[in-house]
Amino acid sequence: MGKTALKLVADESFDLIVTDLFMPEIDGLELVLKIRKITATIPILLMTGGGMLFPKGSGGLNDLTSSAEFLGASFVLQKPFRQDDFKKVFVQIFPAG
């Protein structure tokens, strides 16, 4: 997954990259960092359902999402998210008009 994404980003042009935080091969943080070495202009939306992995109040998921933003993720959505949350991100990336 992640390795294929990196090859595609190096060889093709994209308007948006949507990825998950927890994936096999390359996790979302590493993928964001490697994409940013290839290009700084493609918006990256990172999604995660990892909130179930961390106890409430531990700060673990917030630390990961903050790291993702620091490494270059344009937006982070925590699953489950509402359709309206996705639409807000989409409108920020592709404003009408």
Image (cartoon, rainbow, N blue to C red):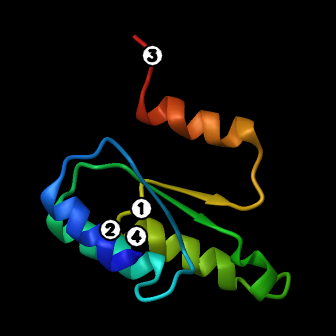
Distance from the alpha carbon under mark 1 to that under mark 3: 22 Å
Distance from the alpha carbon under mark 4 to that under mark 1: 7 Å
Viewed as shown, does residue 25 lie left or right of 5?
A: right
Q: Which of marks 3 and 4 is nearer the N terminus?
A: 4
The residue that disc 2 covers is 5
Where does the N terminus fall, quadrant-wise? bottom left
The residue nearer to you, when weighing 70 against 27, is: 27
When asked about the image quadrant of residue 83, the answer is top right
Distance from the alpha carbon under mark 3 to that under mark 4: 27 Å
Distance from the alpha carbon under mark 3 to that under mark 2: 28 Å
Q: Which residue extends farthest top? A: 97
Callout 1: helix, strand or loop?
loop
Distance from the alpha carbon under mark 2 to that under mark 4: 20 Å
Q: Position of residue 77 (x, y in %)?
A: 63, 57
Where does the C terminus fall, quadrant-wise? top left
Viewed as shown, does residue 73 lie left or right of 51?
A: left
Judged by depth in the image, the label closer to the viewer, 3 or 4, is 3
| Mark 1–mark 3 CB contact (< 8 Å) | no
Label annotation for residue 73 = 1
Label annotation for residue 96 = 3
Three-letter code for the amino acid on which mark 3 is drawn: Ala
Figure check: 81 above or below 51 = above
Judged by depth in the image, the label closer to the viewer, 2 or 1, is 2
Q: Position of residue 61 (x, y in %)?
A: 67, 79
